[in-house]
Image: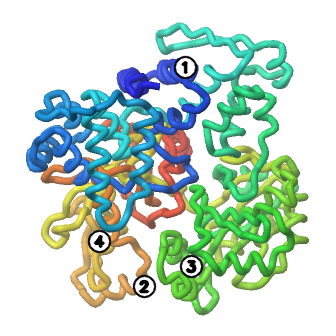
Amino acid sequence: MDYKKLVEVYENISKTSKRLSKTYYVSELLKKTKDDEIEKVLLLLNGRIHPAWDKSDMGVAAKLVIKALALASGLSSDKVEKEWKKTGDLGIVAYNLMQNKKQATLFSEKLSVEKVFADLRKLSKISGHGAVDTKTKIISGLLSSASNVEAQYIVRTVLEDMRVGIGDGTVRDSIVWSSVEGLKINYDGDGNKFDYELSDDLLQLVPEDSKNKYANIVEIIQDAYNITNEFAEVVQILRKDGVNGLLKVDVSVGKPIKVMLYPKAKDMEDAFRIVGKPAAFEYKYDGFRIQAHKKNGKVMLFTRRLENVTNQFPDIVKAISENVKGDDFILDSEAVGFDKNGKYLPFQSISQRIKRKYDIERVAKEYPVELNVFDILAKEGKNLLKMGFLKRRKLIECMIKEEDKKIILARQLITDDIEKALDFYQEALKAGEEGVMGKNLEGIYKPGARVGYGVKLKPTMENLDLVIVGAEWGKGKRSGWLSSFHIACRDDDGNLLDIGKVGTGIKELVQEVIEDSSDAEGVPNKDSDESKVEDSSEEKVEVAKEDNNRVTFTQLTELLKPLVIEEDNNGVKVKPEIVIEISYEEIQKSSKYSSGYALRFPRVLRIREDRAVIDISTIDFIEDLYFEQK
């Protein structure tokens, strides 16, 4: 397939905000996509070259792209950077420069999707001495062969900043429209409505009393994706075996699946209302999700964002190998840190272990974890997702030999008595946990979904997981640091929506803690009581020592610098990759931000290394919280 056909879809989608129009454009492209091209096209549509579970990175920053643009255009790097400062978008710079490039490659070739995809994948495999020059030449070669609009999207793909608004929901619906045999879509073309017709064969696959049979078909596609984590695989199955083939998609030990998520209950009475009586209640641990696989004697560990962290946690691998019976299984669990006295620690105290590549054994001893197992998804070749929760719990009780501070079963109470449940809840809080999880005893395991089979109950306002999309350079004592961080939530299409700025909850040095002020709506300014800083340096030192796990400005600055995609004198725009957990006093309506909301007194709690952008809080979730607080 010519790359320009994909670029035409990018262009069409970038010009509309209507979900149905986007679905139509992508579905028409997929209809023309051959089987051997489907993986490449689907990944590139989302600005990726690897599946979500593969964390390989192209390792390309804005500075490297500037060098490649200079080489391809015949201009100096300074000239390219000057153009970048004007537009704030290297994609637009590529469009302009390639339109008027001074030197043309004599042997330039017509770009295909396969060529672009193959060259971009090379970038993630290049490292070591000479890597920068090699990557520069590869990107420059693509740009030299590209039209100006093709160059724009090549640069945006390299920087992982597509700006076209294609989310997983749009891709999924496009697959439904293009690849489900027996489904006829009648689309009016104006982006406002469509209707559908189902064949008799498809009608047999959905409940007779269903009011929205189309939604049932969409759910089948979504369920298959939540298990495979690859849209290309879903399309290939649909083309070969139809929807019936997707109904047979099974979990595969060694390949992570999306974890089940839990909505928040308002109170204990609400928890029982959602999950039924009796219900199982378990401690809600302040750790990070670990999906543990064992196959042919080999243990593999994956985070909630599907990242393989087996090498980073040899202690967990050992605990599973020695304490869990079975040769083939998938466990769902939470890894929780603890101190030398055995007291559980907050997530931030052990989060650095997720990214650790060196001195792993030393760090494992310095920051030990306990694995709290609470579910099982597969055992000895049998898929357990449809088995009731209580039966799944009994299975892991038979499999696990508990060893304190190594591997244990999640603390549990089964009851229909609200007073006993509340006592258990208070017990969890006294133990330093976040709260409790309430679970339906007959509930199935639904990957990737927040359904009525389980809830979480916490005493505080629900914190938000938001992604940093920009920052401003600090002044005075904060000169050289990024200090006021622009944060965003997302919509169902994956579009990022601003919800304000945050600068509090971040420390400078162990010797000096100064809370930042921010211009986000509802945040105190330098003259307000909430933003005053005590003059006592001794008090600052004590605060810092007691809260040594807080995020620092230095830490955030170093994490964000390689992700810069736009820059001016005041600040930067960054690739949306760093997810932070935010607490706040209140959610307010706001016309200042694209989300329509702002956070009053937002505060950084921690960096969520276990969260990807797809995991951040959605605008629908924030709207629900807004109305709940009223």
**Residue at 63% of width from left, 62% of height from top?**
302
Q: Label 4, label 2: how many angstroms apart (C-alpha)?
A: 19 Å
Q: Label 4, label 1: how many angstroms apart (C-alpha)?
A: 49 Å
Q: Label 3, label 1: how many angstroms apart (C-alpha)?
A: 53 Å
Q: Label 2, label 3: how many angstroms apart (C-alpha)?
A: 13 Å
Q: Quadrant of residue 536?
A: bottom left
**Vertical placement of 94 versus 325: above or below?**
above
In terms of sequence position, does the residue under pointer 4 or pointer 1 come before the other? Answer: 1
State which mark lies toward you, 4 or 2: 4
Q: Identify the mark at residue 170; answer none if there is no mark.
A: none
Q: Disc 4, disc 2: CB below 8 Å?
A: no
Q: Residues within 10 Å of mark 4 (few under 14, many from 20)?
A: some
Amino acid type, label 3: Leu
Q: Which residue is mark 3?
A: 345
Q: Identify the mark at residue 32; answer none if there is no mark.
A: 1
Q: Give the secondary structure at mark 4.
A: helix
State which mark lies toward you, 2 or 3: 3
Q: Disc 2, disc 3: CB below 8 Å?
A: no
State which mark lies toward you, 4 or 1: 1
Q: Which residue is mark 2?
A: 546
In terms of sequence position, does the residue under pointer 2 or pointer 3 come before the other? Answer: 3
**Residue at 74% of width from left, 28% of height from top?**
240
Q: Which residue is mark 4?
A: 554
In percent of width and height, residue 489 lies at: 44, 45
**Residue at 14% of width from left, 29% of height from top?**
100
